[in-house]
Amino acid sequence: MLPAVPKPLVHMLAQRYIAGPTLADACREVKTANAQGKLATIDVLGEEITRDDEARAIAGAYRDVFQTIDREALDSNVSVKLTALGLKLDYDLCRENLESVLREAAGRNNFVRIDMEDSSTTDDTLRLYRELRESGYENLGIVLQAYLRRTLDDIRSLADLRPSVRLCKGIYVEPPELAYQGYEEVRGGFLRGLEELLDVGCYVAIATHDEWLVSEGRRIVARRGLGREEYEFQMLLGVAEPLGNRLVREGHRLRIYVPFGEHWYGYSLRRLQENPRIAGYIAADTFGRLVPRRNGSI
């Protein structure tokens, strides 16, 4: 139903987890997160690019982000989607763009994480990650999706690099032969992936809003005796904020994913379509703000 929903309403539903169209909007949200004791990662939206010049412009926008992070003294790194840097247009173009972002980050002692997209991009994403790590870029991390059946094999194939990995459930719609479909299956894949990553010595960002998985993650890092600097939790801007605040109070590192950009509409439709739980959460919260309770009823 979402494509038929008026654009202003989609914006209303999505604005809780998108900073806004400009870098200034993202800076405002990062400053708020930092003041609450949270770290951040900034994402420049741009998955709809269809031309080389658009991909280069996104790379330029990321370079601007790093300059702004330094100027504003923000505690933030960045996440990049390779399709925004031209992966579907030309592999070498994507590599060139990503390297330009990595050089800017390295010069400012900062870090870049490659987001994982749908399964059509997985092989090229992991290939590029390995190539750049082997070329000497240490300030580069990756994302793995727990619902993909291949993920444990991918962890083992990357083990020699000791990667920094964001582990998430995964939101793209994938066929059963590629991805677990059941809720508990996905949860199980997440915990197996977390244990395997820690077994091979990776720094893991535990990215989930699932309270049970957060609890299990806390239990696992405590059992292994990991210090505060040896792992982190990650959450989307505007989602599960009470749970995130509790993690911070307990002394865990929490990083908030802060997307911004003019391409917010397409991103919003995908996010809401691909994750009905988040769509429902935001819609219920928004409705509750617009229609306040009176006398115990709506």
Image: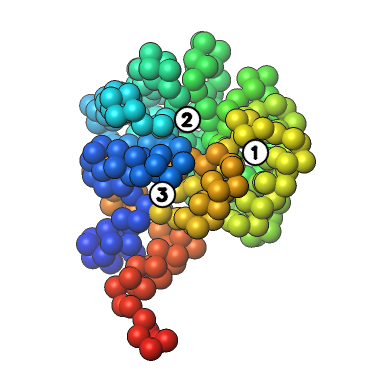
Going from the N terminus, do you reach mark 2 or mark 3 first? 2
Q: Which mark sits nearer the N-terminus, 1 or 3? A: 1
Circle 2 sits on which residue? 113
Image height check: is 297 above or below 54? below
* C-alpha span from label 1 to label 3: 26 Å
- The outermost residue toward the top is 135
Quarter of the picture holding the C terminus: bottom left
**Residue 36 seen from this side:** yes
Determine crowd level at label 2: few under 14, some 14-19, many 20+ residues with C-alpha closer than 10 A.
Answer: many
Amino acid on which disc 3 is placed? Leu
Query: Can I make out residue 258 in this image?
Result: no
Circle 2 sits in a helix, a strand or a loop, which is it? Answer: strand
Image coords of residue 98 (percent x, y): 39, 22
Q: Relative to 173, is 41 on the left or the right?
A: left
Q: In the rendered view, does 45 fall on the left or right side of 79? A: left
Disc 2/disc 3 C-alpha distance (Å):
17 Å
- Amino acid under disc 2: Arg
Q: Amino acid at mark 1?
A: Thr
Q: Which residue is mark 1?
A: 151
Q: Which residue is mark 3?
A: 237
